[in-house]
Amino acid sequence: MKFKNNRFNSKFLIGAIILISIIGFYLRYSGIDKVSLWMDELYTIMRIQGSLSYTLLTSSDSAFPPFYYLGMNIFRSVFGTNDIALRFPSVVFGVLTITAIFWLGKELFNWKTGLIAGSLFAIYPYAINYGQEAKQYSLLWLFMVLSFLFFFRFMNKGRKSDKILYILAMIISIYSIYIGFIFLILHWICVFIIYRKKIKDWININLWIFILYLPWLFIAIKNWLARSGIQWIPEKTKAYFMNELFSLITNQSSQLGNSSNIEVGIYILFICIALITLITDKKNNEQLIILTVWIIAPFIIYFIISSIYTPLLVPRYISFIFIPFILIFSYGLSYGLEKKALRIVSIILTIILIILIVNYHIQPIKENSLKINKENWKYIFSLACDNSNEKTLTIIQSSKHVPNLNNSLFHEHYGSCIKGEILYKEELKPLPTLSKKYSQLLFIYRGYPTDQDKVIQDIINLNYTQKEKIHSFYSNIVVFN
């Protein structure tokens, strides 16, 4: 498509971005409260319940810096802590990222690449999932994209405004989640490969970032050395690293549902077109290097850290690599649409891809948010409310991985309708004396279904009969009569 004048060009692009953003907003907001808050989101509530100083204090001993939680604390004071209010900021960040990706794609390649990339991000399952979660990831992705955008602009145009905006984007990233430092490392790699002539300007930028991060630097070092909040991450094999790279790129994830082989084939075809084009076109070498570093280097960094210090690779910590993949794919598709020899094939494959995305992704999102594997405490506590009576004892037990399950967060948020008595126990050894006044017992716990078999058997030995056992990922309820 060619435009006769820039005015029409601008109006078309603005209208297209607004339309895509509306679609992205609908997909993120639709069903936002259908899936229960899971453990990490309940931790968000815990950190923002008190004053701003309390939020700072709790962030000083966790895997996450305070920026996101401070903002959520202020937001909570106005809109409360219901499911929609907690998740709505992530929806907004996700929608804004659509425009940011369009902007980056246009800056790296052309407006067609940006428009395709923004459209894909609007409907991409990973993006929708974390755009519905009361955590930092949606915010992180927004400022990650902006950091790459302003990095590329400053390195090529040298404008002071881009330098300031880059510093701002990086500061927000590393004050929101420590993963933000990965982006800084990626930019350092790009500087050494492409922009060595700009090294003085780059050192000056990093000096400003260092100064602005000084108030939190020693707390960050302390948490890193103590592995605060990441002790639970298991060790990963080399095969796991490679499998996770492929699953993130092709959406072959057991957590979000699998793509079809046809869809994966279309992805790979246009990635190959993009790579061949970029390699043969010397004008775009910088863009190819930046996107390649963005995809490959994080896995190398995580692998090195996991090998010599502590396991660190978790899908949600590395899932940001799907964004450069989308950009490469979009460039390949836009190139195919421009060339007469590839145009018809590209249009047919694009139609097939859209149909597959709707069939495999949009329908599950529309029906039940995303069919993702997370604790469904809303469902579990709804069952508890429905099954309880005045002679019911409800025991809520935490696992060793979740020491704060017994602080009544779950009950306050979902279980206030539970009738009878409620007992919070870190350990049920020995079991409480259960007198005849309890005609029914409900046992709620987090973990795999077999994790509490010993406790369940002990309850049965106390002349209680197991009636029903419901498992929803890590969330469980067992009903005894």
Image (spheres, rainbow, N blue to C red):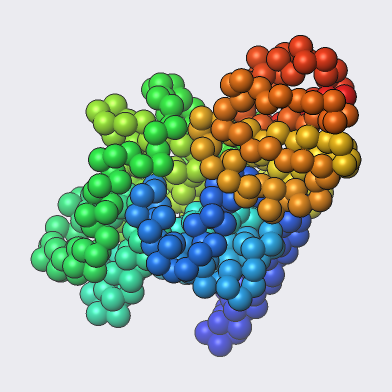
Q: Is residue 200 visible?
A: yes
Say how many tags the image has: 0
Location of the N terminus (image quadrant): bottom right
- Left or right of 367 in this view: 168: left
| Residue 360, quarter of the rendered image | top right
Residue at 75% x, 59% y: name it: 30
Q: Is residue 273 visible?
A: no
Location of the C terminus (image quadrant): top right
Residue at 29% x, 69% y: name it: 167
417 up-or-down from 53: above or below: above
- Left or right of 170 in this view: 37: right
Residue 155: x and y in percent read 25, 67
Residue 414: x and y in percent read 73, 50
261 up-or-down from 21: above or below: above
352 up-or-down from 183: above or below: above
Residue at 51% x, 38% y: name it: 403
Residue at 46% x, 37% y: name it: 314
Residue 52: x and y in percent read 44, 69
Judge by depth and name the residue closer to the eye, 218 or 387.
Answer: 387
- Left or right of 385 in this view: 8: left
Judge by depth and name the residue closer to the eye, 145 or 93.
Answer: 93
